[in-house]
Amino acid sequence: MVKIRLSRFGSTHNPHYRIVVTDSRVARDGGYIENIGHYDPRKTSETYLKVNNERAQYWIGVGAQPTDTARRLLKSQGVKFS
């Protein structure tokens, strides 16, 4: 199954996440199909959340399932779910 989920990057005590499309069997920080955005939970800059809405909408349209956190972030950026 294809999932839209967060992949952790950044150093210790400084998390940054990529919003990625990946196979659900791959490890959290393993390889991914496509990077569709990024998220900084510490909000250290004005662009702490950026999502490519067009690509996110495409992946949802072909059956990718977002995790709960990814769904919340995508919804806050205006991505529509069917």
Image (spheres, helix red, strand yellow):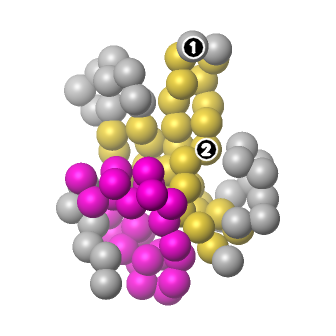
Q: Which residue is mark 1?
A: 13
Q: Which residue is mark 2?
A: 7
Q: Position of residue 39 (x, y in %)?
A: 42, 38
Task: Give the left or right position of residue 5, taking residue 37 as reference.
Answer: right
Q: Position of residue 43 (x, y in %)?
A: 32, 24
Would residue 70 be counted in the magenta stretch? yes
Would residue 58 be counted in the magenta stretch? yes
Q: CA distance from mark 2 to mark 1?
A: 15 Å
> Where's the N terminus, which quadrant?
bottom right
Task: Give the left or right position of residue 60, taking residue 14 as reference.
Answer: left
Secondary structure category for the residue under label 2 = strand
The residue under label 2 is which amino acid type? Answer: Ser
> Where's the C terminus, which quadrant?
bottom left
> On the image, which quarter does residue 74 sit in?
bottom left
Q: Name which residue lies at 54% across and 24% down.
A: 15
Vertical arrangement, residue 47 with respect to residue 45, above or below: below
Is there any visible trace of residue 52 in the rendered image? no
Q: Main secondary structure of the magenta part?
A: helix
Task: Give the left or right position of residue 49, taking residue 38 as reference.
Answer: left
- The magenta segment is 52-76
Q: Name which residue lies at 50% across and 86% down.
A: 62
Q: Name which residue lies at 24% across and 53% down.
A: 76
The residue under label 1 is which amino acid type? Answer: His
> On the image, which quarter does residue 50 sit in?
top left
Q: Name which residue lies at 78% across and 51% down.
A: 27
Is there any visible trace of residue 66 in the rendered image? yes
Q: Position of residue 68 (x, y in %)?
A: 45, 58
> On the image, which quarter does residue 47 sit in?
top left
Q: Which of the two discs, 2 and 1, labels the residue nearer the N terminus?
A: 2
Vertical arrangement, residue 12 with respect to residue 82, above or below: above
Q: Position of residue 29 (x, y in %)?
A: 72, 43
